[in-house]
Image (cartoon, rainbow, N blue to C red):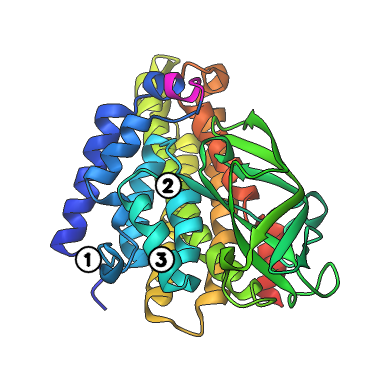
Amino acid sequence: MDLSYTEEQNLLRDSVKKFVDDHYDISQRNKISASDEGFSRAHWQQFADLGWLALPFDEDDGGIGGTPVDTMIMLEEFGKGLVLEPYLPTVIMFGGAINAAGNPQQRAELIPPIIDGSLIATFAYAEQQAHHDLNNVVTTAIRDGDNFLINGEKSLVLNAQSAGKILVSARTSGDSQDPHGISLFIVDAAADGLTRTDYPTVDGLRASEIKFTNVRVSDDQRLGPLDEGFGIIEKIANRAILALAAEAIGGMQTLYEDTVNYTKQRKQFDHPLSEFQVLKHRMTEMFMEHALAQSLCMKANMLETQGSSETQRTIHALKYLVGKASRFVGQNAVQLHGGMGMTEELRVAHYFKRLMVIDSQFGNTDHHLERFVA
């Protein structure tokens, strides 16, 4: 099997790498993170100009028709720079849902503004009582004539303060944990009855708690069949996990390389730390954990591209392995940097915090190990 990248994929990787090298040293990232929106609108427009926002969309909708492997290449480079722009919530999650289940009118209305950078959007799926169970939805959408009234609360909605549209999961029938009976609605972020509490996350991004109080949506704003939204949610979650795994792998590579370089420079007893055998073994283990996760990520993306029946089980394995490897690589990078590893000025701590947040998104290691075994 040929696992080498195509010429186009190499060009994509090189262009993203150049952007990260030019715009994302840690001081620049900290400055962007401290801004009002937590990301750069100028960078976002540059993403659009370079065609990155069009990558996963079908050519019929104005996109490039890229594969999950193409997205993996981009997100891995994003992970090396801790890129802050809302590619995951807008393109992967919201855009992926429209791409998967939108009717012609919804696709024509929403995909072009995502591609040209004028629309930022997000997906409100998480609820406080749900933990990691995507089917645990107590937010309701009750039919009121030709409309629905949405009531409930959503947690950790990424970049909601900058979003123009929010995709919301709500229960239209069934019990609170029944996979059947969940529907999806495209809600205007400025809709009456929608209130937000915005906050920065520990990894420097932005998220919101959103409360819906009799938010009225029309039947035209429903995405996909009534009561059958859970299948779409699972599809979005799988694509998000693949993207997050690729980002984590990029972050782990940077941590490993920074640690090797640091131990070559830092001396103890007149010898560089890199010459001590026990530290050599530790850094070899860091490399192996990263390499194993990278290999499984490639396999999972290829299976997703092929539509294999093994995809779901492999994604569970990937999320578990990435979480395990991220913790090992991150903790050892901080330890081998000593006290410097805990400072805000050095980028090691920022990568470690991002990796820990990725582990918690869409199910942590324990959750996906249980799903894999089941």
Neighbor class of circle 2 (other Cα within 10 Å; few <14, some 14-19, many 20+) is many
Amino acid type, callout 2: Tyr
Label 1 or label 2, whichever comes before in sequence order: 1
Residue 324 appears left or right of 300 = right
Amino acid type, callout 1: Ser
In the picture shown, does residue 40 fall above or below 286? above
Q: Quadrant of residue 298?
A: bottom left
Residue 118 seen in the figure: yes
- In the picture, the disc for residue 107 is 3
Between circles 1 and 2, the one closer to the viewer is 2
* Secondary structure type for disc 2: helix
In the picture shown, does residue 35 fall above or below 178? above
Q: Are marks 3 and 2 in contact (CB under 8 Å)?
A: no
Q: CA distance from mark 1 to mark 2?
A: 25 Å
Q: Which residue is at 53% across, 73% downward?
A: 314
Which one is nearer the viewer's eye here, 226 or 182?
Answer: 226
Position in image of residue 151 (x %, y %):
79, 53
Which one is nearer the viewer's eye here, 360 or 337?
Answer: 360
Position in image of residue 139 (x %, y %):
78, 57
**Residue that label 2 marks:** 87
- In the picture, the disc for residue 4 is 1
The segment highlighted magenta reads: 31-36
In the picture shown, does residue 326 fall above or below 46? below
